[in-house]
Image (tube, rainbow, N blue to C red):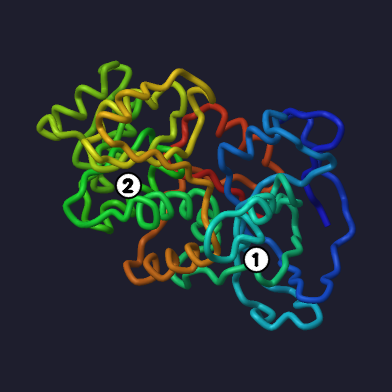
C-alpha cells in the first residue's frame, strides 16, 4: 500500500511517499480502506516537527473516512463494507479525558491515516452520517468534535445565547454551524471581507474584520450592547486570549482550542476574577461525543464546508495550502 511518512527529517518537502505492506488485523481490530481524509492545523505542526515528543517514522493525519475491509477475530461492531471514521483519541470512549486516553491520538501518539489502508481497534471507530459524502464525512473527527465539545458539552449553549468565533478555519466554521443549529447568534472575526461574507451566508449575525478593526473586542461589546458574548471559541491563543476575556460577558465561558497566534502570554488574571470567567481547554472529544454529534448532523442534514479537495499524491500541496491560511472551512484529500 502507499502511505506518506515522516522519516528522519521534518518539513512538508521531506514528507515521503512510500510503499508499505498492508497491515493485517489482529483480535478486535478492523482494517479500513481509506476513501477520504481531511487536514487540521495540528497535522501541519506535526509534519513540520513543531509538536513535542514526536516519534519517527510516523504516518501523519488524524481525520479520515473509509470502508471496512476486514474485521479481525472477535471484532463485531462493524461489518465489511460499512463506512467508518476513526475517533481522534483512540482510547477516549466516554467520560472524562485521562492521562491514559489522552495519549492515544491518531497521527501523533499512534500511526495516522495518510495511507491507503489503516488499522483501528474496533472501539476506536464510529459510523458516519449516511447523507454525507466521503469527503464531507472525513472532516468530522477532529474539527467538528472539537466544536461540538466546546459548545454543547462544555459551554452548554442554549437558544438565545451569543457566541464569538475567531477565524474561518475548520473548528471555527463548525462552531458557526453548530451555534446556529443550537439557536445562538454568532459573531465571526476574519482578516478577509470575502470570508466574512461567506460566513454571513452560513448564518453569522456579526462580522468583524480584525485587520480593519484591531480593537475587535470593543466591536464585540458594541454588537452585544455592552454586555459581551456568552461564549468565545478561542482559536487564536496567546495573541487573542486577553481580548476574548474583555469581550466575554460577566460569567461568560471561553473554550481554549488553538494557538495560532502563540502558545504563551501574560494573562489578565484580575479580569478573569472580576468577570468570573470560565476558561476551559478543549482537546477534541470522546467517541460518545462524536456519536451524539453525528445524530444531530443526521437529524438536521447539516453539511460540512469543504474549501478544496486534493488528490492523495498531492498531500504536500494540501499542507502548503493549509499553511497559506487561504482556506475557508476544511481542506480534504481524496483517495
* Callout 2: SS: helix
- Say which of 260 and 4 sits in front: 260
Q: CA distance from mark 1 to mark 2?
A: 27 Å
Residue 200, horizontal then vertical, whole percent: 24, 41
Report the mark closest to the observer, 1 or 2.
1
Residue 25, horizontal then vertical, whole percent: 82, 71
- Within 10 Å of disc 1 (Cα), the crowding (few <14, some 14-19, many 20+) is many
Residue 35 shown left or right of residue 160 in the figure? right
**What residue does disc 1 label?**
124
* Callout 1: SS: helix
Task: Reply above or below: 19 against 128.
Answer: above
Quarter occupied by the C terminus: bottom right
Task: Reply above or below: 134 against 205.
Answer: below
Quarter occupied by the N terminus: bottom right
Quadrant position of residue 245: top left
- Say which of 102 and 326 sits in front: 102
Mark 2 and mark 1 in contact (Cβ < 8 Å)? no
Residue at (48% x, 23% y) in the render? 261
Residue 41, horizontal then vertical, whole percent: 56, 37
Residue at (32% x, 47% y) in the render? 176
Tell which circle, 1 or 2, labels the residue nearer the N-terminal end: 1
- Within 10 Å of disc 2 (Cα), the crowding (few <14, some 14-19, many 20+) is many
Residue 188, horizontal then vertical, whole percent: 29, 36
- Say which of 88 and 302 sits in front: 88
**What residue does disc 2 label?**
176
Quadrant position of residue 72: bottom right
Amino acid at each position: 500500500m502507499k502511505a506518506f511518512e515522516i522519516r528522519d527529517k521534518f518539513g512538508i518537502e521531506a514528507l515521503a511517499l512510500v510503499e508499505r505492506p498492508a497491515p493485517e488485523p489482529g483480535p478486535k481490530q478492523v482494517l479500513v480502506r481509506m476513501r477520504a481524509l481531511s487536514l487540521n492545523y495540528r497535522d501541519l505542526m506535526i509534519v513540520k516537527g513543531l509538536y513535542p515528543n514526536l516519534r519517527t517514522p510516523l504516518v501523519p493525519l488524524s481525520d479520515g473516512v473509509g470502508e471496512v475491509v476486514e474485521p479481525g477475530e472477535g471484532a463485531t461492531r462493524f461489518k465489511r463494507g460499512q463506512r467508518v471514521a476513526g475517533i481522534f483519541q483512540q482510547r477516549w470512549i466516554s467520560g472524562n479525558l485521562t492521562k491514559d486516553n489522552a495519549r492515544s491520538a491518531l497521527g501523533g501518539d499512534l500511526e495516522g491515516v495518510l495511507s491507503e489502508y489503516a488499522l483501528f481497534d474496533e472501539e476506536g471507530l464510529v459510523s458516519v452520517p449516511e447523507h454525507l459524502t466521503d469527503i464531507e464525512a472525513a472532516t468530522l473527527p477532529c474539527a467538528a468534535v472539537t466544536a461540538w465539545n466546546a459548545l454543547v458539552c462544555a459551554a452548554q449553549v442554549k437558544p438565545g445565547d451569543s457566541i464569538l468565533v475567531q477565524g474561518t478555519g475548520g473548528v471555527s466554521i463548525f462552531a458557526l454551524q453548530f451555534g446556529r443549529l443550537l439557536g445562538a447568534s454568532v459573531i465571526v472575526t476574519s482578516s478577509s471581507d470575502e470570508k466574512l461574507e461567506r460566513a454571513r451566508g452560513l448564518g453569522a449575525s456579526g462580522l468583524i474584520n480584525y485587520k480593519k478593526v484591531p480593537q475587535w473586542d470593543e466591536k464585540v461589546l458594541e454588537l452585544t450592547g455592552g454586555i459581551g458574548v456568552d461564549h468565545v471559541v478561542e482559536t487564536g491563543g496567546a495573541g487573542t486570549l486577553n481580548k476574548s476575556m474583555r469581550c466575554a460577558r460577566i460569567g461568560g465561558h471561553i473554550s481554549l482550542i488553538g494557538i495560532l497566534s502563540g502558545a504563551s502570554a501574560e494573562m489578565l488574571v484580575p479580569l478573569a476574577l472580576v468577570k468570573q470567567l470560565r476558561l476551559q481547554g478543549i482537546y477534541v472529544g470522546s467517541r460518545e461525543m462524536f456519536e451524539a454529534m453525528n445524530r444531530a448532523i443526521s437529524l438536521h442534514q447539516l453539511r460540512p464546508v469543504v474549501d478544496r479537495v486534493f488528490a492523495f499524491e498531492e498531500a504536500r500541496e494540501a499542507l502548503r495550502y493549509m499553511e497559506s491560511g487561504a482556506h475557508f472551512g476544511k481542506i480534504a484529500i481524496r483517495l
